[in-house]
Image (cartoon, grey):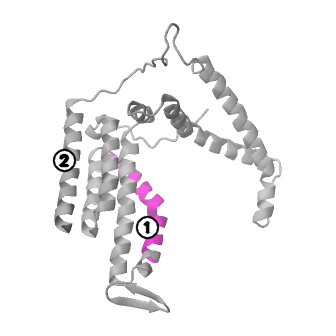
Amino acid sequence: MSIALDFYVHRESWLHRLDPRVKLWGMLVGFIAAFLLPYLLVQGALLLGLHLLLLGNGIPWRVLRGLWRQMALLVVLIMVLQPFFVPSGDVLLAVGPLRLTVGGLIQAGLFATRALVIAFFVGALLFTTDQRALVQAVVRLGLPYTWGLTFSLTLRFLPAIQQLFGTVREAQAARGWVAEGNLLRRFHGYLPVLVAVIIGTLRMSDRLTLALAARGMAAPTDAGTSGPAQRTVWRDLHMRRSDWLTLAVVTLAFLTMGFWLFAFKG
């Protein structure tokens, strides 16, 4: 039985009910804003706003804390390494040719906050959109159906392969298998486990192929037609008035930000 790689948190909030195509557009706009806004305080306010938005729509703090833990290493690396590559402003510390400056610290904070903003924009999409709606949205936006299906199957079966790896490793350990020594010896010791996982993955792929063929995936056209088969869905996506309004507000805010940046720099 497969385990879905799913970050979706089921709630009945406004953000959950929003059309996923609007959320995809909002995420794209958020990415552009994160790269264009050159001010640390503005980036921090954007990050705070994302937290308030997610918390206000029912996403528990433990989920947000988990995303913070995932980003912690990257943030630490940026804050440690980046300041020495921007030698501007007053020097706080000098170690040989390296100079830690105030400008470098500000720039590192900006980069770290930018990375967090991008991560939480992605999180806002994944936490509030289930896989079915997300794949359906990208297909409706023009992605070929087979590509969308491949994307969905990847999300679903990668954790199944990981679970298979853990099962095989535990079974081998119960038979006395131990991987010890240096990196090369450990890799050689994992060969029996990898072989078993590859065989299990091929069997899983074969069963999946038969299941898709039994559901008509091998038939490219309908009988009596010359075009591609028309696929139906149980719950189709429909833009509601609130979706159009949100789309207009997000687009207007993005255009206003772009005009403000252009006018300020000009």
**Majority secondary structure of the magenta segment?**
helix
- Residue at left offset 40%, top offset 57%: 65
x, y percent for residue 177: 81, 52
Q: Amino acid at mark 1?
A: Val
Q: Is residue 53 above or below residue 198?
A: below
25 relative position to 146: left or right: left
The image quadrant where one finds the N terminus is top right
Of residues 122 and 181, the one nearer the viewer is 122
Which residue is tagged 1?
A: 75
x, y percent for residue 265: 20, 67
- Name the quadrant containing residue 232: top left
N-terminal-most mark, 2 or 1: 1
Q: Is residue 135 above or below residue 120?
A: above
The label nearer to you, 2 versus 1, is: 2
Q: Is residue 180 visible?
A: no
- Residue at left offset 18%, top offset 57%: 259
- Residue at the far top: name it: 224
- Residue at left offset 26%, top offset 68%: 39
The image quadrant where one finds the C terminus is bottom left
Q: Residues within 10 Å of mark 2 (few under 14, many from 20)?
A: few
Q: Is residue 117 magenta?
A: no
Mark 1 lies on a secondary structure that is helix
Q: Which mark is residue 252?
A: 2
x, y percent for residue 85: 43, 79
x, y percent for residue 157: 59, 37
Q: Is residue 65 magenta?
A: yes
Magenta part of the chain: 58-80
Mark 2 lies on a secondary structure that is helix
Q: Are marks 2 and 1 in contact (CB under 8 Å)?
A: no
Q: Amino acid at mark 2?
A: Leu
Q: CA distance from mark 2 to mark 1?
A: 31 Å
Q: Is residue 57 above or below residue 105?
A: above
